[in-house]
Amino acid sequence: MGDVFRALADPTRRAILDELQERSGQTLFELINRLVTRHGLSSTRQAVSQHLGVLEEAGLVRSRREGRYKFHDLDTAPLRAITDRWRIDPQEEDPCGSP
Amino acid sequence: MGDVFRALADPTRRAILDELQERSGQTLFELINRLVTRHGLSSTRQAVSQHLGVLEEAGLVRSRREGRYKFHDLDTAPLRAITDRWRIDPQEEDPCGSP
DNA sequence: TTGTCACGCAAGCCTGCGCTTGCCTATGGT
DNA sequence: ACCATAGGCAAGCGCAGGCTTGCGTGACAA
């Protein structure tokens, strides 16, 4: 499996994750359009395609083929590797509900 | 401030964070030794020094000067930016204590 | 079948990044 | 004063990574 950290290193890839979080199951061309209109990024189809490849190898994106379309979904599970490695207190919140 | 994600992209820098988590307040030479003995990495002084610079710019490492020594401490605060950005459920654990 | 659409593959280019090399500053010991 | 230690600065090298270019493939519509 690919490197999760290296996958997150690129700003365009992070924007892709943002997009997939906001709207799950986007195709390649959908992503390109939304990257342009909402993030001010102008990336080629190949560029975004390669980014999706990296993200998929890192396990951050899962894809499903349907006909000639390929839909992409976000998977935040690999991000646990980061929080687990350097133990981050899971929010100072009081999940038990106070008196 | 520097890029937290790019700072995490390098495996040697991640090992440095591991070391600083295990033993806080290490100097440059201490880190070099422990990287060799415990992580099998053989990095030059300059390399580690530059890595520390990147980590410091990213806010992941804080340093304090005392005499001719410079001690380094881990700061996991910037990692919150990651967990907050793609909302990770804070562990499936039951923090309230069961039965 | 022909054409279009959504996507994949692969080679080349070019910038950025990590590492080395060499020299410098400053603190502390003797 | 002298030297060793701990660390800093900056230029150069080499390679990986991101982008482009060009072509190829399978799915659907006419």
Image (cartoon, coloured by chain):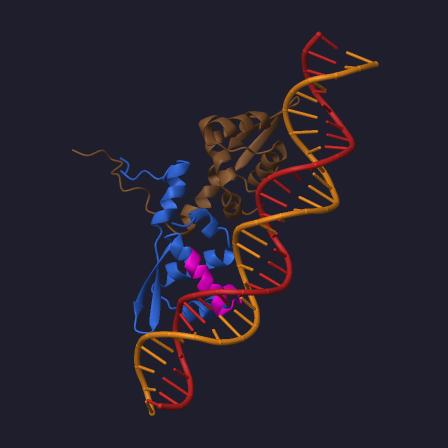
Chain colours: A blue, B brown, C red, D orange
Reply yes or no: does residue A12 show up in magenta: no
> Residue D11's x, y, as percent?
75, 45
> Residue D8's x, y, as percent?
68, 34
Instruction: Inspect this view and state whether residue B95 appears.
Output: yes
| Left or right: B3 in relation to A59 | right
Residue at image point 50% right, 46% down:
B9
Instruction: Inspect this view and state whether residue B75 appears.
Output: no
Residue at image point 40% right, 37% down:
A85
Q: In this picture, is B35 found above or below A35?
A: above
Q: In this picture, is B34 found above or below C18?
A: above
> Residue A25's x, y, as percent?
34, 65
| Left or right: B97 in relation to B9 | left
Q: In this picture, is A80 found above or below B36?
A: below
Q: Quadrant of residue C12?
A: bottom right
Reply yes or no: does residue A49 show up in magenta: yes
Q: Nearer the viewer, residue A36 or B42?
A: B42
Q: Quadrant of residue A75?
A: bottom left
Give the overall secondary structure of the magenta segment: helix
Q: In this picture, is B3 found above or below B48?
A: below
Range shown magenta: A37-54
Q: Nearer the viewer, residue A54 or D16?
A: D16
Residue at image point 46% right, 62% down:
A50
